[in-house]
């Protein structure tokens, strides 16, 4: 029995619905949901168990479905695309927003009225909780569905998502503020209901995350592997990207896939990667050592005791990473450079094939301009890290290409 915790984060919320898609495919049984802000809105539809409708909302998302604003103005603000030609118009729109004392979220209320079915949520037998802050009473509210008066669920969902930039209006005679100001990741709501196995979908939105004592609690965190954009970036393009990201990052978490930005089934054969390094010719090992400022050692000792650990540092591979992680990190750098399709499940072999087919030799020689002594400086190496890694990649890939051609 899993509880699902959904963090607040505005337009980033599409990531959570992508995650829900993956969880459904994986057969994960969700019995309770808690959420703050957009997490509360998504949580309500998840409790309603209408996946297709929910996915469709986000897949066809646009700013006009949430706020009353000129979409072209919002796009230019998000991209900081302000020029002398459009400055006067944009300032006029901003003045109107200020005169109205905030952004009008009438479209959001209309959207919720269209899709939220309070009676279905109450009858679902799923635990459902949200967080908001009562400005009128100056206190946080952690509410379960049974605490919310009948017919008022949409009001309380809006209360949970009431960003300060929105035009303030009273709900039931009271003013509310986004629940992220108290707890943007409401794990405690489900722990209080007895849940011990939790899935927390992070958005890293602005807000406070309250600590939870983790004794006897198992929390699986689903975290985005890429930037989710800005809080008010409700553009269709951003929503569709975040849907994919949520889906694949969830599969990565549950299926223990490798990769930082890509999704790769592990080979789970450390000997294969040890042999890869073992088979590097002496001349190539010495060349790698020269690039990194490592010399005067037997070449295999140099490789395993100095070069590979240094390479792991440059690639930000943690101490728990293995030889496979180092090779894949190098492959991913090339995959990103040549824009190899990210949203796809790979195994090691077909990922390697894709990378090898796209790779073109690097022609830089930055390392030759750096004295050997300075190559031991972490600060200096960080400033030229990408160039150094490109040179190392070239040595390793030439070795792979040579093997492939045999």
Image (cartoon, rainbow, N blue to C red):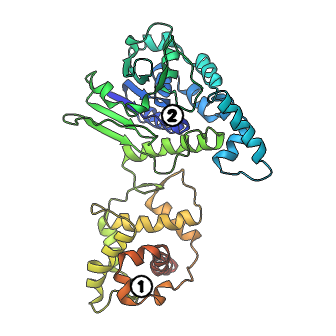
Q: Is residue 397 left or right of residue 272?
A: right
| Residue at image coords 58%, 45% | 241
Q: Position of residue 86 (x, y in %)?
A: 78, 47
- Toward which corner of the image does residue 362 lie, by quadrant? bottom right
Which residue is nearer to you in this view: 326 or 203? 203
Q: Name the residue beneath numbered marker 2.
A: 17
Location of residue 121 with respect to 55 vertically, above or below: above
Residue 286 shows in the view: no
- The local secondary structure at tag 1 comes to helix
| Residue at image coords 56%, 79% | 361
- The local secondary structure at tag 2 comes to helix
Cα distance, mark 1 to mark 2? 46 Å
Location of residue 169 with respect to 387 vertically, above or below: above
Farthest left residue in view? 215
**Quarter of the image with the N terminus in it:** top left
Farthest bottom residue in view? 296
Which residue is nearer to you in this view: 358 or 175? 175
Density class for disc 2 (Cα within 10 Å; few <14, some 14-19, many ≥20) is many
Which residue is nearer to you in this view: 200 or 158? 158
Which residue is nearer to you in this view: 164 or 405? 164
Residue 66 shows in the view: yes
| Residue at image coords 43%, 32% | 180
Q: Is residue 11 left or right of residue 81?
A: left
Q: Position of residue 139 (x, y in %)?
A: 37, 22
Q: Name the residue beneath numbered marker 1.
A: 291
- Toward which corner of the image does residue 359 lie, by quadrant? bottom right
Density class for disc 1 (Cα within 10 Å; few <14, some 14-19, many ≥20) is many
Q: Earlier in the sequence, mark 1 or mark 2?
A: 2
């Amino acid at each position: 029995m899993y509880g699902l915790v959904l963090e607040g984060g505005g337009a980033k919320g599409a990531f959570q619905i992508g995650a829900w898609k993956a969880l459904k495919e994986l057969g994960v049984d969700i019995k309770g949901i808690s959420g703050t802000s957009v997490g509360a809105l998504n949580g309500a539809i998840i409790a309603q168990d209408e996946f297709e409708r929910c996915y469709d909302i986000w897949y066809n998302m646009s700013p006009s479905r949430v706020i009353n604003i000129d979409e072209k103005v919002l796009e230019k603000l998000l991209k900081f695309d302000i020029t002398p030609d459009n400055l006067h118009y944009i300032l006029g729109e901003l003045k109107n927003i200020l005169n109205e004392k905030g952004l009008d979220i009438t479209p959001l209320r209309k959207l919720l009225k269209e899709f939220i079915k309070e009676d279905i949520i109450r009858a679902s037998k799923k635990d459902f909780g949200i967080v908001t802050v009562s400005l009128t009473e100056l206190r946080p509210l952690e509410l379960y569905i049974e605490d919310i008066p009948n017919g008022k669920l949409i009001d309380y969902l809006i209360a949970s998502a009431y960003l300060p930039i929105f035009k303030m209006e009273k709900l039931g005679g009271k003013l509310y503020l986004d629940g992220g100001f108290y707890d943007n990741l409401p794990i405690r709501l489900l722990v209080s209901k007895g849940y011990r196995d939790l899935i927390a979908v992070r958005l890293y939105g602005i807000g406070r995350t309250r600590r939870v004592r983790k004794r006897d609690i198992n929390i699986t965190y689903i975290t985005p592997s890429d930037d989710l954009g800005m809080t008010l970036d409700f553009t269709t393009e951003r929503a569709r990207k975040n849907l994919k990201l949520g889906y694949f990052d969830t599969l990565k978490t549950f299926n223990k896939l490798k990769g930082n930005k890509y999704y790769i089934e592990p080979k789970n054969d450390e000997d294969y990667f040890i042999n890869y390094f073992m088979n590097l010719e002496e001349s190539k090992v010495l060349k790698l050592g020269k690039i990194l400022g490592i010399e005067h050692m037997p070449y295999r000792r140099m490789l395993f005791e100095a070069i590979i650990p240094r390479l792991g540092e440059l690639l930000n591979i943690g101490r728990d990473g293995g030889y496979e992680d180092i090779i894949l990190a190098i492959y991913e750098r090339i995959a990103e450079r040549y824009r190899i399709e990210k949203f796809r499940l790979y195994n090691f072999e077909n990922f390697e094939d894709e990378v090898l087919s796209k790779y073109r030799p690097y022609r830089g020689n930055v390392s030759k301009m750096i004295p050997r002594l300075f190559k031991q400086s972490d600060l200096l190496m960080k400033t030229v890290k990408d160039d150094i890694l490109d040179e190392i990649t070239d040595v390793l890939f030439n070795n792979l290409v040579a093997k492939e051609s045999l």
